[in-house]
Amino acid sequence: MIITILMGTITGILLLSILSWKINISRTIGVISGVIIGLFCSIAVYLITSTLPLIITLFLEGTMIIVVTLIIIAFRFFRDPDRIVPDSTGNIVSPADGTIRYIHQIEAGEIPFAQKKKRSIALKEFAHTALLDSDGIIIGIEMSVLDVHVNRTPISGKIVYQEAHPGPFYSLRTMEAITQNERMSTVIKHGKYNIGMVQIASRLVRRIVSYVLPDQQMETGERIGMIKFGSQVDIILPLLPDLCLKIKEGQHVLAGKSLLATWNDED
């Protein structure tokens, strides 16, 4: 029994450590999850199949660890919890759960770039809108499969532009497989200012579901859509003199709840 449980626990640690690296989550989470899931699965398999040969028992343990892990990931992925949205005027909240990967300044008229896995995606569609008429800031929020994938509006306003950009299915061995992800680009007009939002899907599973229509009026923190197995959301803000960022690179944020920035909403 001890050998079976020990081998199952080690298998859990190995499998979930590799998985945590592949899906870009903390290695510590992977190891701890591997211990818990591996221990649970090895005990369950031993109680059911204690008379089977060790090799078959180990195979069943590995299979059960994978199945249980996928069920847990699916449960976390498809969550859609209610969020208490900050009610103060002038607040800009995060449109997505995830980690702040970069904060870059862009000049008026400059085509902004979203960055994924050291590759760049030119957001040329915004050149046809008023979003780039002034200097701005682009913030990249990277999501893991453990984050909630329902996205929310960063501020109240009217949907004045929304366009889907399907991602062509190149071979995964080509460079374009990374740079041609499916994405949904949206511009929200708040007073006299425009805020841009880009939802970027995974290069493997590409499906972005929008909950809104053009010209629709939105409130801060309202659900705007979901990236099914998505990977990133970028937000573009106008660089106003009184804009005060409340986040830094590496910080984890929650959609509709975490403050990205504040500004004087009376301008």
Image (cartoon, rainbow, N blue to C red):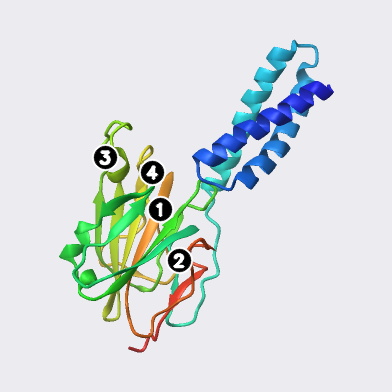
Tag 3 near tag 2, CB within 8 Å:
no
Q: Secondary structure at mark 2?
A: loop
Q: Quadrant of residue 127?
A: bottom left
Tag 1 near tag 3, CB within 8 Å:
no
Residue type highlighted by circle 1? Gln
- How far separated are the C-alphas under marks 4 and 2? 20 Å
Q: Secondary structure at mark 4?
A: loop
Tag 4 near tag 2, CB within 8 Å:
no
Q: Mark number for residue 94? A: 2
- How far separated are the C-alphas under marks 1 and 2? 12 Å
Mark 3: give few (<14), some (14-19) or many (20+) Cα within 10 Å.
Answer: some
Residue type highlighted by circle 4? Ser
Locate the C terminus by quadrant.
bottom left
The residue lying furthest to the bottom in this view is 266
- How far separated are the C-alphas under marks 3 and 2? 29 Å
Residue pointed to by mark 3: 176
Mark 2: give few (<14), some (14-19) or many (20+) Cα within 10 Å.
Answer: many
Closer to the N terminus: mark 4 or mark 1? Answer: 4
- How far separated are the C-alphas under marks 3 and 4? 13 Å
Residue type highlighted by circle 3? Glu
